[in-house]
Image (cartoon, rainbow, N blue to C red):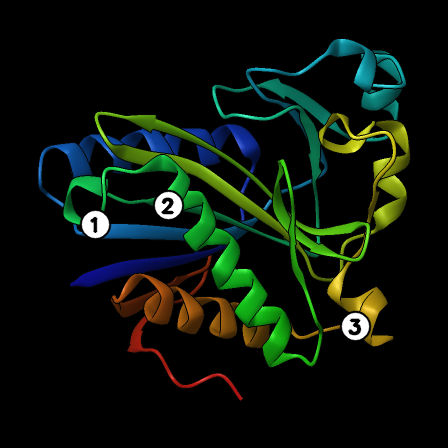
Amino acid sequence: MLCHVEQLGTVDYAEGLRLQAERIAQRKAGELPDTLLLLEHPHVYTLGRNAKRENLLISEERLAQLGAQLFETDRGGDITYHGPGQLVGYPIFDLTQHRRDIAWFMRSLEEVFIGVAHDFGIEAGRLAGVPGVWVGNDKLVAMGVHISRWITSHGFAFNVNTDLGYFAWIVPCGLRDKGVTSLAKLLGQKMEMDRVADCVIEQFGEVFGLTMQIERSRVKSRESRVRTPCS
């Protein structure tokens, strides 16, 4: 089964929502195969369906002064942060072609990033009762999805080179006794985003049994290629 991958560079959050809606409509109409959107967002905080406003620790006016936006979304989960250096992914998958099982889909997403962490020599795993991928008590990958007619949207936020200081303004995912971490912090060096994205794409293919076809899209360039192995 084919999965179309769009690597979009930095995309404003509102534009990311628009792109998701467009791809969801196309997937429901059978005009697209499963699709994975990979991108980064400018500084933004997003509230999931179950978010509590008190988990935003500063005013919206102060957020604006920090150059950050705030959005309410229809994904699951509480509040989280997106920003430069964080790899955000929106899988637009038709679960009728896989398994009509939301828990299976979430476990599979987690398995992708447990595998990616292993590729970089990091032992990561799950914590009972909370979604995402963890290294000890610190979250490396946040997850929250929405499903309509078995088509998935939203997805994951993988802290690669993320400035973790931006999490100080929220209670990440509403978990007061948990921390956050990043690939760069764990490895002690800034990571090449394209290399990390290639590892994510490879693991998606392996975990979901998909052939990954990649399109990289930038303001001044566009290319299509077949995935090369992560190394």
User: Where residue 163 sits: x, y (%)?
Assistant: 83, 51
Q: Quadrant of residue 103?
A: top left
- Tell me the residue at 47%/36% (across/down): 16
Amino acid type of the residue tagged 3 in the rendering: Lys
> Which of the numbered marks, if any, corresponds to residue 190?
3
Q: Which residue is drawn at the image coordinates 66% and 75% (left, top)?
A: 192
Query: Residue placed at 66% from the left, 23% from the top?
Result: 78
Q: Nearer the viewer, mark 1 or mark 3?
A: 1
Q: Is residue 51 above or below residue 180?
A: above
How far apart are labels 1 and 2 at the CA level?
10 Å
- Residue for badge 2: 104
Q: Residues within 10 Å of mark 3 (few under 14, many from 20)?
A: some
Question: Looking at the image, is mark 3 or mark 2 earlier in the sequence?
Answer: 2
Q: Residue at x 48, y 62 (%)?
A: 112
Q: Are marks 1 and 3 in contact (CB under 8 Å)?
A: no
Mark 1 or mark 2: which is in front? 2
Earlier in the chain: of badge 1 and badge 2, it is: 1
Count of marks, rendered view: 3
Q: Is residue 168 above or below residue 225?
A: above
Pick the residue in front: 41 or 178: 178
User: Which quadrant would residue 47 be assigned to in this image?
Assistant: top right
Residue at the bottom extreme, as displayed: 231
**Which of 230 and 119 lies nearest the eye of the viewer?**
119
Q: Is residue 38 left or right of residue 87?
A: left
* Up/down of 164 relative to 17, above or below: below
Name the amino acid type tagged 2. Trp
Q: Is residue 187 above or below residue 222?
A: below
